[in-house]
Amino acid sequence: MSVTLYPGTPVPTRRPLWQRLADDLVLGWRGWQAAREAQRRLRALEGLSEHTLRDIGMAQCTGLRARSIAASDFLRGL
């Protein structure tokens, strides 16, 4: 009986540079899109009155200024 040594299956321990760059680019793009969408949602909420924000449960949302109905109307040009 003879024994043949098997060198094993090569397992890559590191990804190629182009693959790491592509993955970083995709993650950066997704992060930028998520931040832009969050900013867009906050801007949309800023146009609502204080009473409406309280009714929908967003009165304590970070980044929104508490203001009166008169101030909101003035900013919207009413």
Image (tube, helix red, strand yellow):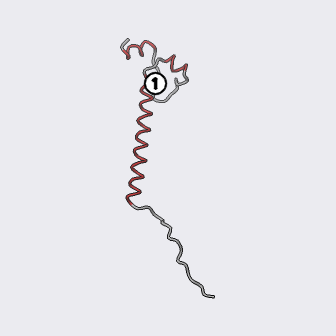
Q: Position of residue 63 (x, y in %)?
A: 45, 29
54, 12: nearer the viewer: 12
Badge 1 local density, few (<14 within 10 Å), some, or many (20+)?
some
Percent coordinates x, y for residue 21 in the rendering: 38, 55
- Helix, strand or loop status at disc 1: helix
Residue 15 vertical position relative to residue 5 in the rendered view, above or below: above
Q: Is residue 60 left or right of residue 71?
A: right
Residue sitting farthest toward the bottom: 1
Q: Pointer 1: what residue?
A: 45
In the depicted structure, whether residue 65 falls above or below residue 31: above
- Which residue is rendered at x = 45% and y = 33% of the image? 38
Task: Report which quarter residue 17 is drawn in.
Answer: bottom left
For the C terminus, give its image quadrant: top left
Disc 1 residue type (three-letter) = Leu
- Of residue 48 and residue 65, the one placed in the foreground of this image is 48
Give the residue drawn at x 49%, y 18%: 50
Residue 62 horizontal/vertical position (percent): 48, 30
Q: Is 56 displayed left or right of 32 in the figure?
A: right
Residue lying at the far front of the rendered structure = 1
Q: Which of 54/5 is in front?
A: 5
Q: Is residue 72 above or below residue 26?
A: above
Query: Which residue extends farthest right?
Result: 1
Furthest toward the left, the residue is 77
Of 27 and 43, nearer the camera is: 27
Tell me residue 34's x, y (percent): 44, 38
Q: Quadrant of residue 74?
A: top left
Q: Quadrant of the N terminus?
A: bottom right
